[in-house]
Image: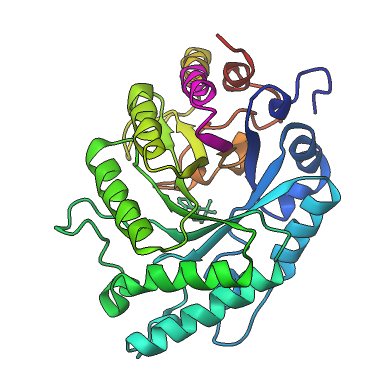
Amino acid sequence: IQTDIPALKDAVPFTMGTASSRAETLGVHGELLVKHFGSLTPGNALKWDATQPSEGVFTFADGDHLVDFAAGHGLAVRGHTLAWHSQTPDWVFAGADKETLLKRLETHVRTLVTRYKGKIAAWDVVNEVVDENQPDGLRRSPWYEIAGLDFIRTAFRVAREADPDAKLFINDYNTEFPRKREALYALVKRLKAEGVPIDGVGHQLHLNIEHPSAAGVEATIERFATLGVDQQVTELDVSVYTDFVSSYDTISPELLLQQGHRYKELFDVFRRQAAHLSSVTVWGASDDVSWLRTWPIPRLNAPLPFDDELQAKPAYWGIVDPS
Ligand code: XIL
């Protein structure tokens, strides 16, 4: 890796994080991680399918490795995620009435949060629960269909009981779009008024090279600041595609430069809003590990600050260079 460039974490006024798998803690990827980042989010290792594949059978090998690696190198950990509709085994919902489902949820949340008590600073307690196209703004997931809003209330309550010092987040994507922003805002406001222990809002920020605007991102941060909650950017990346079907054979230097400007305009917003933003996490450090090489279709993509050889891209310089 390049040793003669500034560390990303030293260039920003908030904690700078990245998603990581076990493999990304090894070799040169591990060196890149330790040099540039102050926080790590296990990208998949703490999801339900990875931690409790069948009922009562918990598997923590990768999660433990990542949490121990972080502790050994002075990195904070974001726990991702306790209740989500995706990457959740079928057994969780199978044959479950509301009481059974909430019991399964309680066991899961208590087991994970207790195991990493004092080691995981922030948890994405629930992920992607908002659907702005529903009249009540709530996603019709199996969680919601079976348990209504109580699955959210239970997840936060149990997480708080298990580790009172962990910061508890509600995390979602597209929060930079006005309708989604308002649906999430209404939900957080309602739950906080009830006393549900929500400490913060996580904005995934899976963006592309053109959309949505940095102004929309800033409006979202300002909006949630009025609720007095902490905020974190949890999964930032900037796809070079503006749709779900295009595919390039190579990605031009011009496009990578445009992406660098895009990173810069976003980090200008993050710096301006640093009073409301405690961390910004990119969803992977280098392009070779990005999930956007397989989602939504297999294609060449380059959404992250470092390239396949772990060299700094214009995107990296966009983060480092303040206006
Ligand atoms: C992605 C992972 O990066 C992939 O490896 C996995 O195959 C699918 O999930 N929103 C989230 C993350 O909250 O958990 C997702 O992570 C990306 C979208």
Left or right relative to 283: residue 186: left
Horizontal side, residue 145 vs residue 271: left or right: left
Residue at x-position 79% and y-position 33%: 35
Q: Determine whether 133 is above or below 83 in the image.
A: above
- Give how far across and how far down residue 109 sits, in percent: 55, 73
Query: Which residue, as the protein is rendered here, is positioned at the far left?
Result: 135
Visible in this render: residue 53?
A: no
Please state, as top left, top right, bottom left or bottom right, where the N terminus lies in the image. top right
Q: Who's the residue at 40% across and 84% down the image? A: 101
Please identify the quadrant where the C terminus is shown: top right
Range of magenta residues? 263-280
Q: Toward the viewer: 132 or 302? A: 132
The answer to whether any part of residue 164 appears in the image is: yes
The image quarter containing residue 134 is bottom left
Residue 264 lies in the magenta-colored region: yes
Q: Looking at this view, is 164 or 252 the one in front?
A: 164
List x then y, in percent, for residue 46: 60, 64
Position of 38 relative to 311 (above/below): below
Residue 265, position as x, y percentages in the image = 46, 17
